[in-house]
């Protein structure tokens, strides 16, 4: 879990450490098959680092809603942009201002825009709280949870019931992911990813693990489970 130490000071390093530790090594793409944004030059370092990682861990491009191998240019209510990820069959997408803003030519960590229904005549665009480097870590944690080989999901419960659980988990210092939808907060323990969605009264908890046995100790909390792979 040492990668959590770098989330606030070096989120690119945190992303690299998490990805290389969580996803197993496998045969990498051949050089002629790579399409790591080669058609777009001067990508921000965080996005370039993600594509480098995806060549080492191809599982990153097999997410249900993956970061695009080839970012594409588009326009929107806030101006020209570079779309680097899509969601739910292009029902939403994420982008950064493109070309890089002239008033900030050295900006290494641009802001991120979430655009809802980008094909509409007047789509809604929301500014993400996290800059690109931290957003990519959020996005990867969320997708890694969904792609984990072993999962456990609770039914809705009083938030107070999570006190004992949270005392055993390390919070990841990121703002909630998808705040206008599920507002997921992330926690981690050895071999275990956890996301909590809720408020001060009620919450739902999801777990993702690489090994079935990692989930078994969760039975001690006597949650009601809608899915439990342990």
Image (cartoon, rainbow, N blue to C red):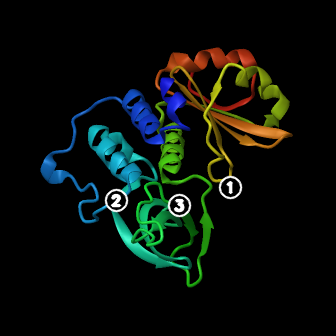
Label 2 residue SS: loop
The crowding category of the residue bearing disc 1, from other C-alpha atoms within 10 Å (few below 14, some 14 to 19, many at least 20), is: few
Residue that carries the numbered disc 1 in the rendered image:
181
Residue that carries the numbered disc 2 in the rendered image:
43
Q: CA distance from mark 1 to mark 3?
A: 17 Å
Label 1 residue SS: loop
Q: Position of residue 48 (x, y in %)?
A: 33, 51
197 shown above or below 172: below
Q: CA distance from mark 2 to mark 3?
A: 14 Å
Work out whether residue 30 or residue 81 is closer to the camera in this orientation and state it: 81
Work out whether residue 62 or residue 43 is closer to the camera in this orientation and state it: 43
Residue that carries the numbered disc 3 in the rendered image:
112
Left or right, 202 with respect to 81, comes to right
219 shown above or below 99: above
Q: Earlier in the sequence, mark 1 or mark 3?
A: 3
For the point 84% across and 40% down, the residue is: 200
Work out whether residue 109 or residue 84 is closer to the camera in this orientation and state it: 109
Q: Earlier in the sequence, mark 2 or mark 3?
A: 2
Q: Are marks 1 and 2 in contact (CB under 8 Å)?
A: no
Q: Which mark is residue 24?
A: none
For the point 49% across and 43% down, the residue is: 137
The crowding category of the residue bearing disc 3, from other C-alpha atoms within 10 Å (few below 14, some 14 to 19, many at least 20), is: many
Q: Quadrant of the image for the C terminus?
A: top right
Q: Residue furthest left?
A: 32
For the point 77% across and 39% down, the residue is: 203
Q: CA distance from mark 1 to mark 2?
A: 29 Å
The crowding category of the residue bearing disc 2, from other C-alpha atoms within 10 Å (few below 14, some 14 to 19, many at least 20), is: some
Q: Are marks 1 and 3 in contact (CB under 8 Å)?
A: no
């Amino acid at each position: 879990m040492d990668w959590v130490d770098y989330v606030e000071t070096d989120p690119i390093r945190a992303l690299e450490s998490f990805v290389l530790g969580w996803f197993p090594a496998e045969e990498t793409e051949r050089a002629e098959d790579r399409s790591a944004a080669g058609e777009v030059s001067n990508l921000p370092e965080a996005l370039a680092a993600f594509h480098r990682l995806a060549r080492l861990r191809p599982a990153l491009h097999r997410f249900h809603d993956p970061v695009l191998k080839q970012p594409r240019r588009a326009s929107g209510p806030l101006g020209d942009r570079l779309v680097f990820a899509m969601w739910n069959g292009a029902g939403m997408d994420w982008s950064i201002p493109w070309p890089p803003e002239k008033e900030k030519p050295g900006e290494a960590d641009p802001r991120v825009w979430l655009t809802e229904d980008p094909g509409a005549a007047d789509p809604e665009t929301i500014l993400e709280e996290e800059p690109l480097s931290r957003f990519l870590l959020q996005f990867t944690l969320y997708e890694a949870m969904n792609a984990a080989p072993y999962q456990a999901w609770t039914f809705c419960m009083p938030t107070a019931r999570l006190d004992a659980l949270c005392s055993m988990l390390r919070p990841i210092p990121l703002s909630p992911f998808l705040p206008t939808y599920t507002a997921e907060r992330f926690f981690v323990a050895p071999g275990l990813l956890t996301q909590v969605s809720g408020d001060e009264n009620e919450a739902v908890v999801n777990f993702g693990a690489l090994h079935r046995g990692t989930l078994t100790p969760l039975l001690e909390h006597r949650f009601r489970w809608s899915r439990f792979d342990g």
